[in-house]
């Protein structure tokens, strides 16, 4: 089966996926009977192009790096995101615009428009799923299209499909874990003897942390993932106001040493759990015992522990960010769409 | 959608699944639109019963404990496994007879007969998948039925679906891990100061180890899982002769202490990996660094680390045995069958 794909947004993740699709073209056809054709790319900064017969995928990444997609083809004017979503011949919309945890836009409107147009959506965008997850899941179901968002929690490490599909039928009462790699990297460096400022600087040099690291170090990125797990796995629509959120900026080198002396280790832990018929969420630094499965997760790696009825505790450890790692989530999502359509 | 279920074999795992199905009847209907009706149970020792309208599920477990299923109903004579598989109105065959790693029988013949009869199979039986995995997967596909076997590796901890579905599109070059809970429990106890014989005795008292512990302590159980991962995830039909297999019986308390002094820990590691265009497998005790994700997996818990192209390493930790834990794998498998049929 062959799918026409449209990218809405074309930054690092979209480019990473394109590279994977090119590398694995034959493998995907042979193993999964999955073929693809990129028909549209629409990016605010890099330009918008559409060709119902297919764009030259091998040239998209370098054109995007030059911020000049429109040099690739003779573009019909005006194939902006909503026109692509509504009027193109794409089967799957790959929503990879920037994450906005304030109001989820424009990504949420992109998702709604795609569902209304009968198009499937795969996304790594945390905004729509964190803020409107339950509504969008229901809307996709009502419209008979697929909506997949694996990459919103642990990139391609399949945290969502593990909970919803791998452990289907199991009831999950708590999910807790290391949901942000930047802060885990900083804490790991501090345990190695660096102070907070040096560790943050190192994380920035390595590209783990943004120039403005607020979203990571104050816990907001982890909070977004708590909201996503609440809406998608726990079925509860929490908002930022429902989640107590504390980052790692108050953790000192002395705290780190003291925890070590107690046989413990500081981790920034995101949690979402059921209590008294409600779903609650929290992000805060916690001292975990060294024997705890999350204690040995070091560096930029993420990990989640699911507490369930039938399986007691199951822990998943893997990358939570990265160009290829996040691109992989979109590939697995598209193969799941393909599977759901009988492919 | 409602499914008629037939149990072939009705030991601990089948009974565990029946209890889960009863406990979750309303939940499964509401959340997944999954309804069920047990129409047949056929067990070599406990008897065989069939009622196309459905058996009294709530009485099956206690009747099985008395080894007298046939007291439950007025059985038509002769509903032995092959008659149930070929002639009953079951949609899904739950193959939970005893594991036989020598020739995979009678379970492999049960699977083949079910596929020929157009029935789906879910199983926790290692024999058919370890010895004839590739053939059975192809046969089910050719016959247009589903074949699921999550519980053959880590009980309900979704080791198979993680690899095949959660990380779909990712190529896995190596899987290594702790594939046997009994031996991991014994090694953990030895690290706590017990000698091998006392640790084994404790494992037997707790029900982790059989009276004859050979299958666990000599590594054969882990080897079966290496064969299963080779055939299902790596697509290679290995046999027992292809896998070097060494158990934990030669590990002494002195070895344990010495490893600790080196900052390491003994684990019985099963591995399957691609090398030079071939798939290779091995089971042997290895000293792993304490910082390795598998080092912190203690007691009867299992864990697998997958080395992949797009996600580097992903580790899954969870139970690898148990009545409810293994029953859960069959439930997830049936919900996947339901999903594949559009449910």
Image: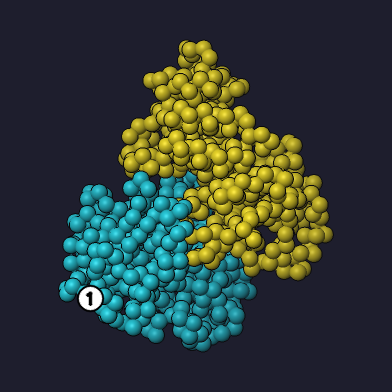
Chain colours: A cyan, B yellow
In the rendered image of this protein, does residue A96 appear above or below residue A201? above
In the rendered image of this protein, does residue A305 appear above or below residue B343? below
Q: Is residue B186 left or right of residue B54?
A: right
Q: Is residue A90 visible?
A: yes
Towards the viewer: B83 or A140: B83
Q: Quadrant of residue B146?
A: top left
Residue occupied by mark 1: A74
Towards the viewer: A158 or A53: A53
Q: Residue at x 60, y 57 (%)?
A: B175
What secondary structure is found at the residue carrying circle 1?
loop
Q: Quadrant of residue A120?
A: bottom left
Q: Is residue A323 left or right of residue B173?
A: left
Q: Residue at x 70, y 48 (%)?
A: B242
Q: What is the x, y in percent for residue A127? A: 30, 67
Total numbered badges shown on the rendered structure? 1
Towards the viewer: A327 or B256: A327
Q: Residue at x 22, y 50 (%)?
A: A143
Q: What is the x, y in percent for residue B22? A: 43, 33
Q: Local crowd at mark 1 within 10 Å, few (<14), some, or many (≥20)?
A: few
Q: Is residue B218 left or right of residue B307?
A: right
Q: What is the x, y in percent for residue A292? A: 57, 62
Q: What is the x, y in percent for residue A111? A: 24, 62
Chain name for mark 1: A
Q: Residue at x 26, y 75 (%)?
A: A73
In the rendered image of this protein, does residue B319 appear above or below residue A226? above
Q: Is residue A160 visible?
A: no
In the rendered image of this protein, does residue A194 appear above or below residue A137? below
């Amino acid at each position: 089966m062959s799918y026409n794909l449209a990218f809405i947004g074309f930054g690092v993740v979209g480019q990473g996926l394109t590279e994977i699709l090119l590398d694995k073209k034959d493998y995907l056809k042979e193993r999964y009977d999955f073929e693809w054709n990129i028909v549209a790319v629409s990016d605010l900064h890099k330009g918008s192009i559409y060709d119902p017969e297919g764009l030259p995928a091998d040239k998209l990444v370098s054109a995007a790096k030059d911020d000049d997609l429109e040099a690739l083809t003779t573009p019909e004017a005006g194939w902006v995101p909503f026109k692509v979503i509504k009027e193109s011949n794409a089967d799957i919309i790959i929503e990879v615009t920037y994450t906005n945890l304030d109001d989820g836009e424009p990504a949420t409107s992109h998702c709604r428009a795609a569902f209304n147009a009968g198009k499937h959506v795969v996304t790594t965008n945390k905004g729509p799923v964190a803020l409107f997850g339950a509504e969008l899941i229901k809307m996709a179901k009502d419209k008979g299209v697929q909506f997949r968002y694996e990459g919103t929690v642990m990139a391609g490490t399949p945290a969502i499909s593990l909970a919803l599909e791998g452990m289907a039928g199991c009831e999950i009462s708590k999910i807790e874990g290391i949901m942000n790699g930047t802060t885990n990297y900083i804490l790991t460096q501090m345990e190695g003897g660096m102070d907070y400022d040096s560790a943050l600087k190192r994380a920035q040099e390595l590209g783990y942390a943004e120039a403005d690291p607020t979203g990571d170090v104050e816990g907001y990125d982890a909070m977004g993932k708590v909201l996503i797990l609440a809406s998608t796995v726990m079925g509860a629509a929490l908002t930022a106001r429902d989640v107590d959120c504390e980052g790692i900026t108050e953790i000192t080198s002395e705290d780190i040493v003291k925890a070590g002396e107690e046989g413990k280790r500081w981790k920034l832990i995101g949690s979402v759990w059921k209590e008294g018929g409600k779903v609650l969420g929290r992000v805060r630094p916690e001292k975990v015992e060294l024997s705890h499965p999350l204690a040995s997760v070091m560096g930029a790696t993420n990990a989640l522990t699911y507490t369930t009825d039938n399986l007691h505790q199951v822990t998943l450890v893997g990358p939570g960010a990265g160009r290829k790692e996040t691109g992989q989530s979109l590939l697995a999502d598209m193969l799941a769409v393909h599977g759901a359509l009988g492919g």
